[in-house]
Amino acid sequence: MFSDAATAVLVAHARVRLRDGSPPGRVFTQLAAAHDDPRVVALAVRLAVDGDRAEAERLVREHRATFAATEPGDAEALGAALESAGFFTAGSTRTD
């Protein structure tokens, strides 16, 4: 779905911010502000949380309605919506 090259740097940045204590939704918001595709950022943050790429890609596909329902450029609202839906929670199976 997404290339490793497109996400590797984002995953590294997300891991640092998560280790510093930022919640995943906030990490998403910070990284999405500088990236064109919020799906790539969501994938990267999810990978930083648990490293399961297949699960992260599945969640991006299953949460496509959440991505579509959020205004472009409103990373804060999208991050909050994804976090409340359990997107960033390891082992989460909740969907839209």
Image (spheres, grey):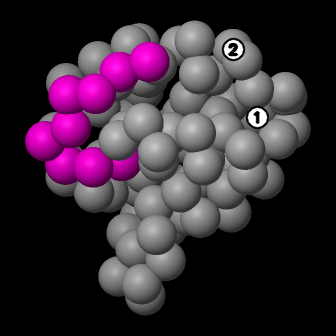
Q: For label 2, count other residues whose C-alpha is less than 10 Å away and answer few (under 14), some (14-19) or many (20+).
A: few
Q: What residue is at 43 percent from the left and 87 percent from the top?
A: 20
Which quadrant of the view contains residue 3?
top left
Secondary structure of the residue carrying numbered label 2:
helix
Picture coordinates of residue 78, whole percent (x, y): 66, 39
Left or right side of 9 for 30: right
Seen from the viewer's position, the closer of residues 34 and 21 is 21
Tag 1: amino acid = Asp
Picture coordinates of residue 37, whole percent (x, y): 68, 30
Residue 9 part of the magenta-drawn span = no
Q: For label 1, count other residues whose C-alpha is less than 10 Å away and answer few (under 14), some (14-19) or many (20+).
A: few
Residue pointed to by mark 1:
36
Q: Is residue 35 visible?
A: no
Q: CA distance from mark 1 to mark 2?
A: 14 Å
Tag 2: amino acid = Ala
What is the span of residues highlighted in magenta in the rendered image? 88-96
Residue pointed to by mark 2:
68
- Main secondary structure type of the part rendered in magenta: loop
Q: Looking at the figure, which quarter contains the N terminus?
A: top left
Q: Is residue 15 above or below residue 58?
A: below
Q: Is residue 74 visible?
A: yes
